[in-house]
């Protein structure tokens, strides 16, 4: 039950005492609740699950992970096993 | 960086697969708990790209699959009431109860609405004050914060026509039940990434220590799943048993404390029946007494529910990884996605539905294997 | 003749004329072997899935309509989008479709556009030149005349654009609460030139599968404004008449074997139907399937498969392998075919099954959608 999709926060406002946002997913915009990510601001990416942001996506961490993937592949090339 | 395509890059996938092939020297069985990961695996054909020595066992991380039959029947009874607008996620709509599913209730005139978010149900409650709006609140820990906040909103808005039919389930007790089972085949786990986004990783430390199994917190894009598998295999080959985080961009050790605070206020732990598996103690959440007015189970008296599972359905054994779907006698014959006996054949993440697809590729001869 | 009972049963039904004098027994229906979910076997009623363009709908046709109208040897049994019939010296394509989309107005078009383009396209897929349409309206008491006027004007404009004429029609009104605003049914007839012979019998291993442009636009455009799923998007329905593209292909002498427009059930449904009816396998390469980013994002958000999302202005063509490049050239020189691309091929293996090579090099089966796609949340 984990269909969480990354989206970019475009606009933030308050409704009925709750922090809400318009999040953009490559051209699709949806209204979501930011109550659980008080530190998220416009421009940040978040994981959205059933209309709620659960966390801010950490770009540095993402880049690091991708670099790790690249290394895993390179290591095999170096060892001649790829 | 958009966090999607980058994590589906085919070249990087090849690199990870090559590394896995280089690492594996003997057979291993790994379980991914989360249905979302099962979906990624099937959707991308990851099963087939892994070395033959690696067996992926699809775990019970599909809340659609494990929602107790009695709860489904209760949902059907509530949804059939004329004053009710019954709101549900799409994948629950075709899960068979003892006699029908939500779509057949809709066909018979029930007001069943598919929604994307529990907030949609609250909007409906405000829009239709004369109707009773009920939201089918199922899911793992990932979904509970959304449901919890929705209940708090309903209270703030002083809604009297809104309630939840709750059937939340928790991952660590399920993993414990699987680890405790006598015929356990699972040697390592991919932990559910977004569950950990909410709950953090602390709950898995005792599991690693007690059962000495590798547990790797894993994401949902193809590269994430491959990496999770790669790390579990590396641990197994090296004889290690550790808790690792392979999804650091979305998971921290402490998780989301705000979310947990709200969940702790609105829900309390309870015993939970897992369809096909049985009772797992303290494995679910229900509404706390302070929020009883939002509990659909208490609000609607639907009489006694006599739940009748199909005697031929062996989904419990499938969900725990004791058998593969093709080993069930009904698989592909009496039980197909078109006429399912149990939930794992309905859900797009269910193991039975997944195997059914591959069986089609290899021809009907495989049905009995 | 009015039925005396409509309750579900597997016994025969007796239909009596109003004077009670005559009775006609019908053969009993046996839903036991249908694909309906288990509960429907005990209470056979229509469910939404029967209209979804997938397996449930196909079984309704096979087990209920076909036996009633003609049986397995009949023209109807060919079950194409349009029937190809001989009328004297002329070979005609004849098709009908009902349009019930909700909401009636969506980004990029309205019910009227679909009503004309949908039937024009069904006729055109046989290789026929569409000529004439009929238009039947079932209107709910209370429907605003302004709206009906817009729908009619839209249909007229669409017909002129497609080069067809609405030559006959009918209007009925039903009580308020019984009709959901407006339903439109159109039937269309077209003329097939001598020598044009398209159909599953011509599909062979080696054929290349082409799609005339990006997929998923119509379904997502409609979903974006439907209750319960609204989201902001710039996506417009792709509703359009495809007879121009078809005529261009035929005029250029392209070796086309079969064409279908992937409406409800999407490309997945079409490929499965053709694989089944031509008894061949189909392989597609996911990375080659043109899915616009917003469509892909909407599908991820809602848990839908873009291959199963409806299109209203795209065609899928099976062409001889040696002529595929030529076909693409012809398609791309038409504004409606600018994004045309090859997405796969026909193979001899796994007859009746459609297989996709996934983005990361694995394989998966693309199944016939069961019914109305249920947005997935898990």
Image: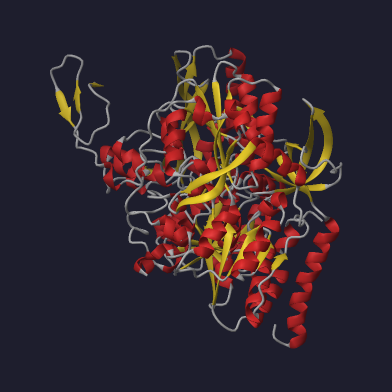
Residue C225 in view in this figure: no
User: Which residue appears farthest toward the left when viewing the image?
Assistant: C21
> Looking at the rendering, in which quadrant would you find the C terminus of chain B?
bottom left
Q: Is residue B366 visible?
A: yes
The quadrant in which the N terminus of chain B is found is bottom right
Q: Is residue B88 above or below residue B142?
A: above
- Front one among C92 and B155: B155
Q: Position of residue B359 (x, y in %)?
A: 43, 64
Q: Is residue C245 left or right of residue B326?
A: right
Q: From this viewpoint, which residue is outermost toward the bottom?
A: A80
Front residue of this view, candidates C317 and B268: B268
**Corner quadrant of residue B214:** bottom right
Q: Position of residue B360 (x, y in %)?
A: 43, 63
Q: Residue at x 37, y 50 (%)?
A: B341
Q: How is the image coloured?
A: secondary structure
Q: Position of residue A74 (x, y in %)?
A: 77, 79
Q: Above or below — where is B324 with respect to C132? A: below
What is the x, y in percent for residue C374?
A: 53, 42
**Residue drawn 45% across the image and 67% down it:** B182
Q: Nearer the viewer, residue B3 or C192?
A: B3
As drawn, is B366 to the left or to the right of B257? Answer: left
């Amino acid at each position: 039950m984990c269909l969480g999709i990354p989206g970019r926060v475009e606009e933030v406002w308050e409704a009925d005492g709750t922090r809400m946002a318009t999040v953009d997913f490559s051209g699709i915009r949806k209204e979501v609740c930011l109550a659980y990510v008080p530190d998220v601001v416009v421009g940040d990416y978040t994981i959205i699950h059933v209309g709620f942001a659960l966390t801010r996506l950490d770009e540095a961490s993402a880049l690091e992970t991708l670099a790790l993937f690249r290394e895993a592949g390179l290591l095999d090339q170096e060892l001649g096993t790829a | 960086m958009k966090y999607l395509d980058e994590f589906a890059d085919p070249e990087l996938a090849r690199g990870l697969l090559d590394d896995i092939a280089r690492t594996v020297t003997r057979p291993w069985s790994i379980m991914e708990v989360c249905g979302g990961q099962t979906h990624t695996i099937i959707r991308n054909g990851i099963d087939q790209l892994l070395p033959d020595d690696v067996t992926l066992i699809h775990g019970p991380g599909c809340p659609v699959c494990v929602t107790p039959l009695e709860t489904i029947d209760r949902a059907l009874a509530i949804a059939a009431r004329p004053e009710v607008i019954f709101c549900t996620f799409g994948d629950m709509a075709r899960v068979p109860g003892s006699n029908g599913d939500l779509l057949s209730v809709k066909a018979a005139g029930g007001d069943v609405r598919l929604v994307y978010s529990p907030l949609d149900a609250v909007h409906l409650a405000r829009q239709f004050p004369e109707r009773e709006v009920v939201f089918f609140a199922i899911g793992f820990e990932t979904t509970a914060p959304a449901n919890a906040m929705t209940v708090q909103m309903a209270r703030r808005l002083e809604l009297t026509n809104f309630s939840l039919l709750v059937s939340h389930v928790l991952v660590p007790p399920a993993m414990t039940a699987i680890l405790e089972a006598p015929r356990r085949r699972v040697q390592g786990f991919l932990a559910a990434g977004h569950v950990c986004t909410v709950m953090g990783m602390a709950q898995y430390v005792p599991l690693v220590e007690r059962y000495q199994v590798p547990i790797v917190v894993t994401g949902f894009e193809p590269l994430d799943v491959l990496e999770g598998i790669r790390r579990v295999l590396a641990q197994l080959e090296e004889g290690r048993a550790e808790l690792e985080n392979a999804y650091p961009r979305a998971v921290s050790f402490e998780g989301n404390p705000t979310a947990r605070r709200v969940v702790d206020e609105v829900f309390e732990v309870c015993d939970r029946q897992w369809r096909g598996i049985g009772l797992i103690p303290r494995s679910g959440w229900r509404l706390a007494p302070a929020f009883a007015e939002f509990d659909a189970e208490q609000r609607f008296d639907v009489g006694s529910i006599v739940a009748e599972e199909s005697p031929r359905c062996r989904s419990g054994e499938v969900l725990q990884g004791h058998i593969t779907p093709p080993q069930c006698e009904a698989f592909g014959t009496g039980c197909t996605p078109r006429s399912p006996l149990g939930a794992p054949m309905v859900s797009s993440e269910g193991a039975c539905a997944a195997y059914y697809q591959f069986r089609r590729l290899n021809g009907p001869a495989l049905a009995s294997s | 003749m009015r039925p005396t009972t409509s309750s579900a049963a597997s016994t025969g039904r007796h239909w009596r004329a109003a004077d009670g004098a005559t009775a006609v027994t019908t053969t009993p229906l046996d839903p036991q072997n249908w694909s309906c979910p288990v509960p429907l076997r005990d209470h056979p009623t229509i469910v939404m899935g029967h209209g979804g363009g997938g397996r449930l709908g196909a079984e309704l046709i096979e087990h209920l309509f076909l036996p009633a109208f003609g049986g397995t040897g009949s023209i109807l049994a060919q079950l194409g989008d349009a029937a190809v019939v001989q009328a004297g010296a002329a070979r005609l394509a004849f098709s009908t479709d009902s349009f019930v989309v909700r909401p009636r107005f969506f980004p990029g078009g309205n019910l009227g556009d679909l009503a004309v383009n949908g039937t024009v396209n069904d006729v055109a897929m046989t290789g026929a030149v569409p000529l004439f349409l009929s238009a039947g309206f079932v209107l709910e008491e209370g429907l605003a005349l302004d709206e009906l006027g817009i729908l009619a004007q839209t249909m007229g404009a669409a017909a002129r654009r497609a080069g067809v004429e609405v030559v006959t029609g009918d209007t009925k009104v039903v009580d308020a609460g019984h009709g959901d605003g407006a339903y439109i049914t159109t039937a269309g007839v077209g003329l097939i030139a001598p020598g044009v012979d398209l159909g599953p019998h011509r599909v062979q291993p080696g054929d290349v599968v082409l799609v005339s442009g990006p997929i998923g636009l119509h379904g997502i455009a409609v979903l974006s404004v439907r209750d319960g799923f609204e989201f902001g998007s710039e996506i417009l329905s792709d509703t359009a008449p495809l007879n121009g593209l078809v005529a261009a292909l035929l005029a250029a002498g392209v070796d086309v074997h079969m064409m279908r427009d992937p409406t409800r059930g999407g490309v997945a449904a079409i490929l499965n139907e053709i694989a089944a009816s031509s008894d061949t396998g189909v392989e597609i390469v996911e990375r080659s399937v043109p899915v616009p980013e917003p469509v892909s994002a909407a599908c991820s958000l809602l848990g839908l498969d873009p291959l199963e999302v409806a299109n209203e202005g795209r065609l899928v063509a099976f062409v001889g392998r040696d002529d595929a490049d030529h076909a693409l050239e012809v398609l791309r020189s038409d504004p409606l075919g600018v994004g045309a691309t090859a997405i796969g091929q026909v193979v001899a293996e796994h007859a009746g099954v459609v297989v996709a090579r996934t983005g990361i090099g694995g394989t998966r089966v693309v199944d016939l959608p069961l019914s109305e796609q249920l947005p997935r949340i898990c």
